Image: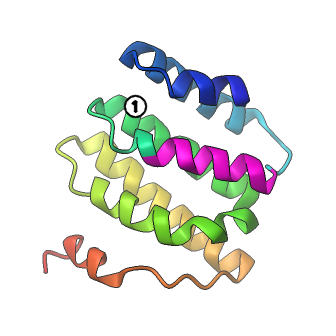
């Protein structure tokens, strides 16, 4: 996973895309939970990727986060306050695949939240964007 994260942090857009694709593949194929340190590295990297100008990179980051949250939801509780507003921002993306990936990640995070009994105090004002308020 470390190699994929390194590639996803590259300056070149094609390398970032390759890194995101590899990251998603690694996480989808994994059967073991990620460590707290691995989750932190992944979240930090993906938060940067969510701001990427390439919609495919942002979409891939959202998909990687969804896969990782299923594997290691208990470690995601430390990152909810940073993740949710960043994901909600992508609900307003111009590209439908990014909006769909953001919606799926939010649903996955909610399921993980229920499964692990995580209570997050997120900035609820950002959720108004979703409902046109």
Q: Does the image show residue 22?
A: no
Q: Residue 118: image x %, image y %?
A: 66, 81
* The C terminus - image quarter: bottom left
Name the residue rendered at 38%, 39% in the picture.
58
Q: Position of residue 15 (x, y in %)?
A: 47, 15
How far across and down, in percent of the image, does residue 53 sit? 26, 33
- Majority secondary structure of magenta residues: helix
Q: Is residue 131 left or right of residue 36?
A: left
Q: Is residue 109 above or below residue 114?
A: above
**In terms of secondary structure, where does tag 1 sit?**
helix
The answer to whether 96 appears left or right of 73 in the picture is left
Horizontal side, residue 28 vs residue 49: left or right: right
Give the magenta range. Answer: 35-47
Q: Residues within 10 Å of mark 1 (few under 14, many from 20)?
A: many
Q: Quadrant of residue 22?
A: top right
Residue that mark 1 sits on: 57
In the picture, the quarter occupied by the N terminus is top right
The mark tally for this picture is 1
Whether the magenta-drawn stretch holds residue 45 is answered as yes
Residue drawn at (41%, 20%), measured in percent from left and top?
11
Residue 113: x percent and y percent? Answer: 62, 76
Residue 116 seen by the camera: yes
**124 in the magenta segment:** no
The image shows residue 37, relative to residue 49, as above or below, that is: below
Decide if residue 63 is on the left or right side of residue 96: right
């Amino acid at each position: 996973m470390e190699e994929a994260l390194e590639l996803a942090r590259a300056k070149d857009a094609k390398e970032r895309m390759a890194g995101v694709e590899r990251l998603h593949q690694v996480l989808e194929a994994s059967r073991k939970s990620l460590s707290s340190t691995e989750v932190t590295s992944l979240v930090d990297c993906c938060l940067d990727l969510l701001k990427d100008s390439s919609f495919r990179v942002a979409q891939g980051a959202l998909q990687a986060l969804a896969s990782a949250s299923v594997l290691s939801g208990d470690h995601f509780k430390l990152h909810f306050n940073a993740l949710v507003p960043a994901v909600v921002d992508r609900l307003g993306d111009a590209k439908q695949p990014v909006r769909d990936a953001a919606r799926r990640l939010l649903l996955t995070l909610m399921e993980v939240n229920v499964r692990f009994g995580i209570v997050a105090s997120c900035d609820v004002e950002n959720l108004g964007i979703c409902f046109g308020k």
